[in-house]
Image (cartoon, grey):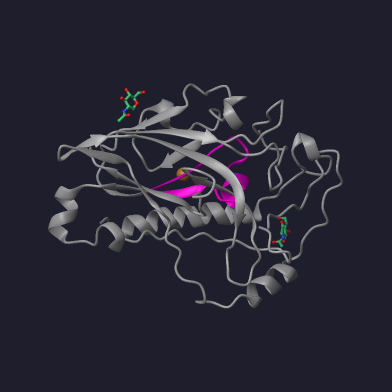
Amino acid sequence: MSSMVQIMGNHAWMLRRVAAALVAVVVAGVVAVSAQAPPPPVTSAPLQQVAGSLQMYVDPLPQMAKIRGYGFQQGRVVPVNLTIGMFQKKWKFHRDLPETPVFVYGQCADSATFPGPTIVARHDVPLAVTWENHLPDRHILLWDPTVPTAIPRNGGVPTVVHLHGSAHPPQADGSAFAWFTAGFRETGPAWTQATYRYPNVQPPGNLWYHDHALGLTCANLLAGLLGAYVIEKPEVDVPMDLPCDDDDLHLVIADRSFNIDGSLYMNSTGVAPSVHP
Ligand SMILES: *[C@@H]1O[C@H](CO)[C@@H](O)[C@H](O)[C@H]1NC(C)=O
Ligand SMILES: *[C@@H]1O[C@H](CO)[C@@H](O)[C@H](O)[C@H]1NC(C)=O
Ligand SMILES: [Cu+2]
């Protein structure tokens, strides 16, 4: 459907981003946990022990659900509106790992996946997505309050969605300051609207959507808030006889380390604001 180069370009960026998340120095928790003692630092030995214990090629390649970002009316392609939520649920990353909490995108909690559903948009057909935050009051990972971070007054996990690589108006860009908590209870200073409109006027290709909240992007992505977004254009795709529909598989490569208990690892070195920075 779209060039491999583009896929790799996006993924290379994602890997860099996730790698950054993995080595991020995490300092202290949310308001709610700031009074607690920092957790003891995790050394690389247990992480390598878990990683080394996982056998490769034993699970089928996961296929995320595709959500069509357009409809048909009397044979014509027409725009649709989608609602996609963010949910906490448990996810099994490997046959031999227990289920563990993640934050993931989906049309409902049951169908939410890591990575999120693949949105298939059509060139020149605008798509409106209402992104909803259904996350709980507390994060599953630690926050770093020593960088400018979205801190809601009444708890909740700030989120905002950025469609990476897309050309769209600034109000739909998912500014780091346009964050919102569950039910839009609290919103950041740049928040203007719940529904983002993506014009899909650029050349066809593979994009990805991911969280972009101020100071929380690394934790929210590590927790699972990412997914693929494809712009198809039959005039380009069909003459090349590329695989389509179920034969067109979208691969998302994401790097994660796991603690001994199977939970997602995030580096919490420096969890003491008096010490760091
Ligand atoms: C966590 O981050 C600290 C500071 O950057 C680093 O020294 C340490 O090696 C990291 N821990 C692991 C397990 O990667
Ligand atoms: C999508 O939402 C817009 C704005 O609320 C509305 O005007 C339009 O009719 C909706 N389209 C569909 C297909 O529901
Ligand atoms: Cu991005």
**176 part of magenta stretch:** no
Residue 18 is situated, as x and y percent measured from the top left of the image, at 55, 54
Q: Quadrant of residue 157?
A: top right
Residue at image coords 51%, 59%: 254
Residue 216 in percent (x, y) is at: 62, 40
Q: Is residue 230 left or right of residue 242?
A: right
Over which residues does the magenta segment extend?
207-228
Residue 215 covered by magenta stretch: yes
Viewer-side residue, 165 vs 114: 114
Screen quadrant of the N terminus? bottom left
Give the vertical position of 52 relative to 254 (above or below): below
Q: Residue at x 71, y 40 (%)?
A: 138
Is residue 247 shown above or below 105?
below
Q: Is residue 3 visible?
A: no
Asked whether the viewer can see residue 127, the reply is yes
Q: Quadrant of the C terminus?
A: top right
Q: Is residue 43 left or right of residue 184?
A: right
Residue drawn at point x = 45 percent, y = 49 percent: 227
Q: Is residue 222 left or right of residue 266?
A: left
Direction left: furthest residue: 239
Image position, residue 251 (x, y; %): 40, 61
Count of numbered circles in the view: 0
Q: Is residue 192 above or below residue 271?
A: above
Residue at 25%, 58% (x, y): give it. 244
